[in-house]
Image (cartoon, rainbow, N blue to C red):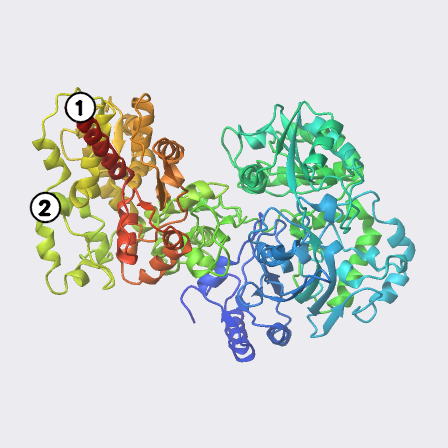
Amino acid sequence: MRRGLRHPGLVGRHEEHASGLASDLRAAVAGEVDFSVTARALTTMDASNYRRVPAGTVAPRDAADVAAVLEVCRAHGTTPVVARGAGTSIGGQATGTGVVLDLTRHMDGIVSLDPEARTAVVRPGLVLDRLRAAARPYGLTFGPDPSTHSRCTLGGMIGNNACGAHSVAWGTTADNVRSLEVVTYGGERLTLGREGRGAPAGLLDLVDRHLALLRTGYPAGLPRRISGYALDALLPERGRDVARSFCGSEGTLGVVTEATVSLVPLPAEPVLVVLGYADETAAADAAAGLLPWGSPRSRGAESGGGPLTVEGMAADLVRGAAGLPRGGAWLFCEVDGAGAARELVRAADALDAVVVREPAGQRALWRIREDAAGTATRMPGGGDAWPGWEDCAVPPARLGAYLRDFRALLADFGLRGVPYGHFGDGCVHVRIDFDLWTGKGVRDFRRFSEAVADLVVAHGGSLSGEHGDGQARAELLPRMYGEELVGLFGAVKDVWDPDGGLNPGMLVRPRRLDEGLRFEGLPVVGVGRAAARCVGVAKCRVAGPSEAPSPGVMCPSYRATGEERHSTRGRARLLHEMALGEVITDGWRSEEVREALDLCLSCKGCRSDCPVGVDMAAYKAEFLDRHYAGLTGLWRRPRSHWTMGRLPGWLAHFGRGLNAALRLPFAASLAGVTPERTMPRVAERSFAYWFAQRASTRRPSLTLWPDTFTNHLAPEVGEAAVRVLEDAGLGVELPPGRVCCGLTYVSTGQLGAARKVMRRTLDVMGEAGRPVVVLEPSCAATLRTDLPELLPDDPRAARLAAAVRTFAEALEQLAPDWTPPRLDRPVTGQTHCHQHAVLGDAADRRLRERAGLTGDLAGGCCGLAGNFGFEPGHYEVSVACAEDQLLPALRAAGDAVVLADGFSCRTQIGDLTASRGRHVAEVLADGVEDRRGSATAERRP
C-alpha cells in the first residue's frame, strides 16, 4: 500500500476495498487510475467551503471508459462517483468520497463544429474558451460565458446550468443545449433530447402523475432559476425536453460524455457602456428598466437590439479602478454598435456614463468583473470572505428591494459582504466574512443561511441563480419549493439512479450545509491557514499546454505540464491537506508536497495574478525551510541549495576564482547543475571595483544597489546605469560595505541564513536615507516584500523596503526634467516576472515611450528563474515556460532590441536563442553616449 494512503475513512477492510477497487479499475479502463496520496489530496475540495476525501481518481479516455468505471464501482458496493471538470463549483458538488472522474485530461475535445447549422458537438472536459476560439472565425460563439470562461468546462456548465454575463441575451446553458449523450450509474447509455427522447423508464410517467404540482410549484418571472431539478421542462406544453431538464442536475443523474450545443452570432461591433449610479440599490433599480429598451433579445434568440449584458458592481468591489464614470455603483452594459451605445446612454437615467469602444479598454474593465469571485474574498480593510451564500436570484424588478433587505440582514448578523453580479437577471453574487473556524461562527453561518433563504423566497427568488445548490443550499430547498416538490426531486433521482451512486449528498437528500467544512481541524495559524485563502476559482489553471497563452505570469509550470499539482491551486490544496494531516500524514516531511513544489519557479506571479493573492513563493520557502530542518549532513539538501542558494557568499569570497573551479571535471554535477546548462562566468572585475576606481565630484542623491548578479556576473549593467543616472544629473553612491537582499537564500528555503544576511545588510545600510536604486528586478522585489516580511520586528527593514526604487522609477521621480536619448527602435523581450508581480512596470513603459522604444514586452516567466532552470530535472519545464510567451515573441520580433532587465531572463535568452538580451540601462547608455558624441561633434570648429 502506498505511504500515506491510510486515513480514518479507509482502514482495515476499507483500505483493502480501496486497493481492490483501484486494481479492478486499472484492469477495466484505458485512462489513468490514480489512488495516490497526491491525487486524492488534490481533489478533496472544489471552490466551495466543503471538503470530502475521495478514494481515488480516474481520467477516462472516452465514453466506454466512463461506462467501465461505473460498472466497476457498482460491483464494489455502490462506490460513489462524481464527475469533475475544472473543480470551480461553489456548492461542493465537485467533491466526492468515492471515485472522482477527471474529465479534463482526455475527454476535452471538439468533435465537430457546423457553422451553417450553428452547432458544435463537444466532450465534457472541453474548456469553454477553446470552444469560443474555434467558433470565432465563423463569427459565432457559445452564449453562456461565466467569469471562469478561461478554465470552466462544458460538462461543468451543463452540470450547474451555468449562465454568465451575456445571459440577458443568450440565456443559460440549458437554453443552448440541443442534445446530450449520458451514461447512468446503472450503465445505460442515453441520448437526451426533446419530446421525451432518452428519458429513463418511468420518468415521464412520474411527471404525468404530478402535472399540477409541476405547473404551480416553480416561481414565475425568474430568468435565473437554477435551484432544484428543472422538471417543468418535462411538461407536455414545454416539449418534454429531457436534455433541458438534465441541465443543472449537478452530476446526480448521469455522466455527460458528449453534448450538442447551439452557437450564436458574435456582435458585429461590441461596445461597452458603463453607467454610473449613486449607489448599489440605484443601479439595481435601474437595471430592470434597461431590459425593455431597444427590443431586447429573447432567450436563445439571435437578433434584436437590447443590451447583451447588464452587470452590476459597487465601489466596495471596484476599489478605485480607473476608467469608470462618476458614481458609487456601476452597470456594465455591452451593446452591438456605437449607435446602440448612444441610445442606451440617452435612455438610461444615470449620473454619468463612459462608452468604451477599444477592445483593450473593454478587456481591462471586464477583468474587474471576471476577477470578482476572488477579489471579493478579500474584504476592504482586511479579512477574508467566503462563499456559502453565493448566487441567489430574484425577479429583476425586485432586485433593488432585495439588496436593501440583504444589506440590513448582513448588518443584523454583524457580517460584511460585497454584492455584485448579473443585475439584469436579478442574480447577486457575494462573498461574506463568515467565521468558519469556530463553533460559534459555524452556528451563525447556519442561522444566517436559513434567514437569507427565507428572505430570497419572500422576494419570489431562487436560492441559486447560477452555481447550483450542491451541499451549500440543497438542505434549504424545502423553504423555496415545499416538501412535496422536493420529495418529487428525490423520486426523480431514484428513477435515474436507483443505486444512489452518483454524487450522493448533493441536491437530493443532501448533507447538512454546516457539515464537512474544509476549515475543520485546520490550525489557526501557519502555512495551512494561509493556503486556505485559496478558494479554488482556478485562475491559475488558465492556458495549459493545449490552450492559447494568456497575459500575466501565473502559473508557468502548470502552463508547461497541465497538471493540477503544478498549479497554484493544486499546491495550496496539498499544503492545506498537509496541515490537516488526514490524507497527507507526514507533515513538513511530505514528499508529495515537496514534489509538487519542486516545479514552482517562485516567480511570484500568483502574488498579483491570483485574485486572492496566494503567495506560493513564500509558502514554498517556508516549506523547504521546515522540510530540511534538523536534517544533518552536507547533501541532505539538494546540492544546488548549497551552491546556487548561497551564491552571493561564494562570489564574495572567491570571485573570478570560481571560473577555474567550474572548469574542473564533474564540477557541474558536484554543484548540482543539470548537464544541459553552462554556468555563467564571473566577470574579470566586479562592478563595485569599477565604481571604486572612478572619480566623481557629484554629491550623492541616491544609493545604487550592487546586487550579486550585477556586481559579479554583469557589471556592464551597473556601469551603464551609472552613466545614465549621471547624465540625468543624479549623483550615485554605493553602500559602504557588502550588501545582499537574501533572494537566493529565500528561494531555496534557507530562511535562517536569509535573515542573517538581511540583518547584516541592514547594519551596512543604516537608516537608508536616500533612495535605493536596484537594477535587478528579483532583488528589488525581495527588498520590497520578503525583507519586511521576514524581519517584521526590525523597523529598518520597512524603511529600506520603502526606499527601494527601480531604475525607471528613479529616473522618473528623481530626475523628472531629464530627457532620455531618442532611440526610435522597436523592442521585444520580457517584463521580469517579479517586476510584474511586485514592482509594476508603469514607469518602465513610460520611460520606453519617452525614449522612442516601441513595442510591448511579453508576459509570462522566462523559465530559468534563478536556480530553478539549472537544477537537474527542470530543464524541459524551463524551456517549456520560455516557449509559452518569451521565445515566440523573440522569433516574431525581427531585428528589434531584446530587453530583459533580469539576469536570469538574459541568461535564458542567451542559452536558447541567438539573441542577446540587454538591460534597459544598457540601451539608454548607448543612446547617451551617441548623444554626447553628436554634441561634441557639433561643438568642434
What amino acid is found at the position of numbered circle 1 in the picture?
Arg
* Numbered circle sitting on residue 684: 2
The residue lying toward the viewer, choosing from 328 and 449, is: 328
Q: Is residue 787 above or below residue 492?
A: above
Q: Tag 2's secondary structure?
A: loop
How far apart are the alpha carbons under marks 2 and 1?
37 Å
- Extreme front residue here? 941
What amino acid is found at the position of numbered circle 2 in the picture?
Glu
Coordinates of residue 86 in the picture (x, y in percent)? 56, 56
Residue occupied by mark 1: 939
| Within-10-Å neighbours for mark 2: few <14, some 14–19, many 20+ | few
Residue at 86% across / 49% down in the picture? 217
Q: Tag 1's secondary structure?
A: helix
* Numbered circle sitting on residue 725: none
704 to the left or right of 175: left
Q: Is residue 326 above or below residue 39?
A: above
